[in-house]
Image: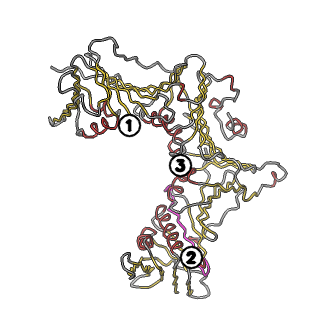
Amino acid sequence: MQHSKLLYEKGILHNKKMLTQSQYSNFKFVARLDQIKTFTAGIKALLFAEHGAFMINEDGFTCTVEQGKCIQASLFMMPACFSEFYVDGVLHFNVNMNVLNECLSIFAGIDCTMKMLYKGPEAPLILVLEPQDECEISTECSIKTTVQEEPMEYSLDDNSSSLNVIFIRGPDLSNIFQEFDKSTEELEITISPRRPHFKIDTLGVMQSESSIEVAKSSDMILMFNCRETTKARYKSSLVRMTQKALSVASKVAIKTDLSGLMEMHFMLQDDSQAEVYIQFFITPLAEMD
Amino acid sequence: MKFKAVMDNAGYMREFLNIIVTLSKLTKECVINIEPDKIHFIANEESGTTAPLVWVDIDAKLYFSEYNIELADSNHSKIMLSTSPANLSRALSSLRSNARHCKLKLINLQFPCLRVEVDVLTQNSNQTRQTAHDVPVTVIPRGEWDYYELPQKPNSKLVLNVPSNRLMRGLIDKIKNLSPTVIFYATSAGEMNLVAETEMATITTRYKNLDIREINPSKGEKNKDQIEASCSVDCKKTSIFFSALQVPTGELSCGIDDDRLIHMEVNIRNGVAIHSILPAVCM
């Protein structure tokens, strides 16, 4: 580290475990972002869980959080998103999401460049942040990492005949979600080849109901791929957890099949044209009849 | 005992209002020291709260085109009042909109009051309207002055000028959520580090190439090449000071005294400054 080591020698810092020396070659992971806005927005969308599981390999960077066995969210970034990306093998480690978020927003909205460094198991994750218009200030955060079991793997069968995929414009879906009754407990999502092509029903505590239908010819639907009707219910509190991701997404993909497991992809707009997206898996409620 | 002062510069009037609003965010009751050439405001909340000790120096000649003070007798060198800065800021709030001039006057209705008269230019016509507020004050008797002594500006070991406190304010605000204390560590080479260390994370922010304003090395350190100073302070207290500041701040100077205190000074302009003392805390 650039300045932490000196501070440790002066007795200002005490926790030696949080320091790493600056030999570049020893790092298992080095990445550099020229602006952290998109990354920070992505991390903020995953703040509903305490720990984030980082998985880094040649294909890119993934951070996954889950809550119970009901919802899982991951942020994906391709190596092309980074101006520098080096990884040695496959790395797994966990980081406290709140601490990470506070560190990322330490310059309070001013866009920074960031360097991420990691040396391997038991070493901290190091972030070096430098505001873009102030070269005299820099912050180093070293965040404790832990090793925990890997997150659950959810997937939809791509070859299933019942796999339905629709693409919707992000801001439009965001408007629909905002119009829902706040007290709603359950949502029922229907995707069908005939009318109503895409329908969301809400069911409230007082048996209050509402429904929204979107025809496949609507401007907000970018792609509609459906062969069989699928219908499933979800807890609205889980669906609401996608709100932060939805608010920054330009495009949303919704995938589901007869099992009812819903996969949502939120594409984030990045200036660099590189692909950044957040993926959610939401499990359905069991049929009650 | 008489006091009367008139302001008629729009910029100064706005600044004066901002200073009072800053004080109202820090304390319920503040002390006003009116001296023949200076006005001081002292905000010192009773112990037990986290608000820091803050005081303001104002050069009377600069802000006030007319400034008359008549003391009770030769025993009294100043007038000492205490009042609620929230009330005073409400009385002054019309300074925000096109005020022509503002008069402050100490009067005695059934109890002592500071009368605030503001002439405001109406937007549509050229006529002025006058507002007057009487803000109740308490006159602090001579015998109790010792309790409200103006804090002395400390002779810090190392004083650095920090530009753009906008960053500092956000920084302290974020560190506050992670760690209860923050260490200021600076060297005479113009480097300052803000360090927060917890079990979960270590965060160090470094400012480089800062101007050194003052160095007062201790006896043992006089021959050293590099003088260092460090002090750990309460993060919440520091954050309260920064978030209370309502004045546009060009320059912040930060004085560090080893394990004793940190002295912040915001120079609004020559002769007008806000000071704060943050006491050291043990880790």
Q: Amino acid at mark 2?
A: Tyr
Label 3 and label 1 in one chain: no
Residue position for label 3? B170
Q: What is the x, y in percent for residue B115? A: 44, 81
Q: What is the x, y in percent for residue B40? A: 57, 72
Residue position for label 2? B63
Q: Which residues are magenta?
A: B35-50
User: Was residue B36 drawn as part of the magenta stretch in this picture?
Assistant: yes
Q: Is residue B78 visible?
A: yes
User: Was residue A148 drawn as part of the magenta stretch in this picture?
Assistant: no
Q: Residues within 10 Å of mark 1 (few under 14, many from 20)?
A: some
Q: What is the x, y in percent for residue B135? A: 42, 76
The reply, left or right, for residue A180 in relation to residue B102 is left
Q: Amino acid at mark 1?
A: Lys
Mark number displayed over residue A40:
none
Label 1 near label 3: C-beta < 8 Å? no
Q: Residue furthest right?
A: B223
Label 2 and label 1 in one chain: no
Label 1 near label 2: C-beta < 8 Å? no
Label 2 and label 3 in one chain: yes
Nearer-the-camera pick, B74 or B105: B105
Question: Is residue A108 positioned above or below A280 on the image?
Answer: below
Q: Residues within 10 Å of mark 3 (few under 14, many from 20)?
A: many
Question: Is residue A78 positioned above or below B186 on the image?
Answer: above
Q: Secondary structure at mark 2?
A: helix
Q: Secondary structure at mark 1?
A: helix
Q: Nearer the viewer, mark 2 or mark 1?
A: 1
Could you tell me how far apart the alpha carbons at marks 2 and 3 are, in whole angstroms? 31 Å
Could you tell me how far apart the alpha carbons at marks 3 and 1 are, in whole angstroms? 22 Å
Q: Chain of mark 2?
A: B
Residue position for label 1? A244
Q: Amino acid at mark 3?
A: Gly
